Image (cartoon, rainbow, N blue to C red):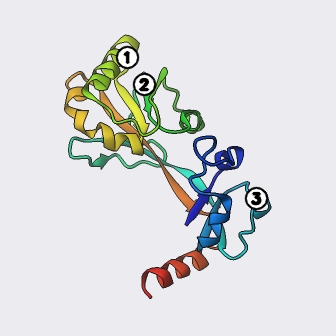
Amino acid sequence: IVIIDEFTLQQKALLPFGRLREPWSALKRANVIALHEGISPQDIPTDINHALIISIRTEWNGVYKLTKAGLRTGNSTNNSTIQLPKQLLAVSAIAHPARFEATLANEGIRPIKHCTFADHHAYTLADCRTLIAECKQANAQAIITTEKDAVKLISYIDELQSHGIDVLCGSIRTVIADKRDEFLGMMNELTHP
């Protein structure tokens, strides 16, 4: 399965000059090519008609409170079971932090500041202490982060909570917009030959 989003199309070159890990011609090995909504097969600079082409989109899946055990509490698709503090600090270490900000804004969540780290950043105790200082300076009672970052912040839950800072996680899910049954049938065939 290969997923192609708008950023991939904007940066069509191989690493380190673009986002591609392999040349476009490598798509001939893909069984499924998932195009983010708004991208058509004609936008791809190589023939992909051999594969099942599906359209996908991401949707908001609510806000969760992270616990020490890594459990998510307060599953909410409308934020009604989580009382969001007025003062939130956004934290992310993802490739496109502006996309996270836009997602939060679309849900009416407006953090007072967004602390960004490099994509795939491994948080340290020093980072945790910096986040605590940022929260204290902004009078924030919680940070809101991505699921990708939440799993890396679990180690620091006690430290954050000892300073009165909760870790909230904004969750998104990927939805297959078309050809869902065909996709699931193909996955069943490939995984249960």
Q: Which residue is mark 1?
A: 134
Mark identifier at residue 34: none
Q: CA distance from mark 3 to mark 1?
A: 45 Å
Left or right side of 172 for 106: right
On-image quarter of the N terminus: bottom right
Pick the front one: 26 or 139: 26
The crowding category of the residue bearing disc 1, from other C-alpha atoms within 10 Å (few below 14, some 14 to 19, many at least 20), is some
From this viewpoint, is residue 84 visible? yes
Residue type at numbered disc 1: Glu
Q: Residue at image x 24%, y 33%?
A: 156
Residue bearing the label numbered 3:
45
Against 45, is 7 above or below?
A: above
Q: Residue at x 42, y 48 (%)?
A: 76
Quarter of the image for residue 23 reads bottom right
How far apart in space, not on screen, are marks 3 and 2 (Cα)?
A: 40 Å
Mark 3 residue type: Pro
In what quadrant of the picture does the C terminus appear? bottom left
Look at label 2 and name its amino acid.
Leu
Q: Is residue 15 above or below residue 56?
A: above
- The vertical placement of 30 against 82, above or below, is below
Mark 2 surroundings within 10 Å by alpha-carbon count, few (fewer than 14), some (14 through 19), many (20 or more): many
Mark closer to the observer (3, 1): 3
Confirm or deny contact between disc 2 and disc 1 (CB under 8 A): yes
Question: Which residue was labeled with disc 2?
Answer: 89
Q: Give the percent coordinates (x, y) of residue 138.
A: 40, 14
Secondary structure at badge 2 equals: strand
